[in-house]
Amino acid sequence: MGYRPLTQLVNKLRETREELPVNHKRVLRIMFQNDLLSHSYKKKTAKYSSYEGSQGGECKNHIKGRFSTDRPLQKIGTDVTEARFGSQTTDERIYISLFTDFFSGEILSYSTSLHPNTEFVLESLNPVLEMVKDVPYKTTIHSDQGTQYQSGKYHSALKKYKVKQSMSRKSSPCDNAPTESLIHQLKVGTVLNHRYKTQQDLEQAISNWVNYYNYKRIRQSNNWQTPNEMRNMYIQKYA
């Protein structure tokens, strides 16, 4: 946890004790003095790319960097990454497909597999499509130009639910920055700080982290609420 969200949690605790709040600079100084600042965000891992050239299924970039939205399930990002276990070889890795709501940062769905095929991506897509089918506005799902997203099955699934498809430009990860950032946070919370002996251990760690991220991790962009709290607050306001 960074010093800013930690400052919020510390001050909430101090408020229950009727104590004065502390400044974030003080929290930063204490964390620095005690070597409590995370260095994992500076670590780099090999980036998985599912791009295999043009398959004839490319789409325009309809997001164009406009990631912010004032309502849930209007703009959604997705990507595929890999995580390794055991001896960290290519024979001991799993692939992760996730979908995140740009409104709150919530991880709407994810799936894991030993094979990065289209079916594995559809497994995580289907729950999202069920969520968006009744929203009264258009949903856009944004991805890179990976072969799974260019497939006919993926196109058909989105078309069936009247979801607009958007794609980043080739070799432009900034076009899907919120999803790329979320994936790095997932790795910081798992494989960049831990080693897992088995596939089952790694998958359990991913499940634990997703639950923590959605229900416990406060975000400055959410007014210091968790992704789940942010979505529920919108539902309560407009129900």
Image (tube, rainbow, N blue to C red):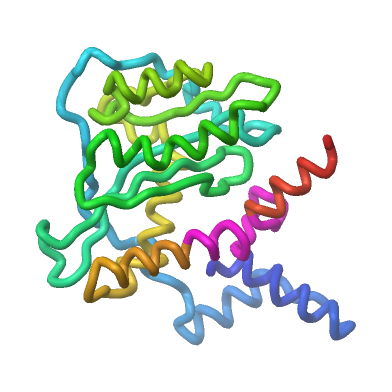
Residue 159 found in image quarter: top left
Q: Foreground residue, 162 or 14? A: 162
Residue in view at x 27 percent, y 25 percent? 170
Residue in view at x 76 percent, y 41 percent? 234
Residue 51 in the image, given as x and y percentages of width and height:
20, 31
**Left or right: 21 with respect to 77?**
right
Q: Is residue 225 above or below residue 39?
A: above
Q: Is residue 227 above or below residue 52?
A: below
Residue in view at x 60 percent, y 26 percent? 133
Q: Is residue 143 above or below residue 214?
A: above
**Left or right: 75 with respect to 146?**
right
> How many numbered callouts?
0
Magenta span of residues: 210-226
Q: Foreground residue, 177 or 4? A: 177
Which quadrant of the rendered structure holds the C terminus?
Answer: top right
Q: Foreground residue, 209 or 134? A: 134
Residue 228 in the image, given as x and y percentages of width and height:
66, 53
Residue in view at x 27 percent, y 23 percent? 151
Residue 56 found in image quarter: top left
Query: Magenta stretch: residue 105 in it?
Result: no
Residue 158 in the image, given as x and y percentages of width and height:
45, 22
Residue farthest right in this picture: 18
Residue 13 in the image, given as x and y percentages of width and height:
77, 79
Q: Foreground residue, 10 or 71? A: 71
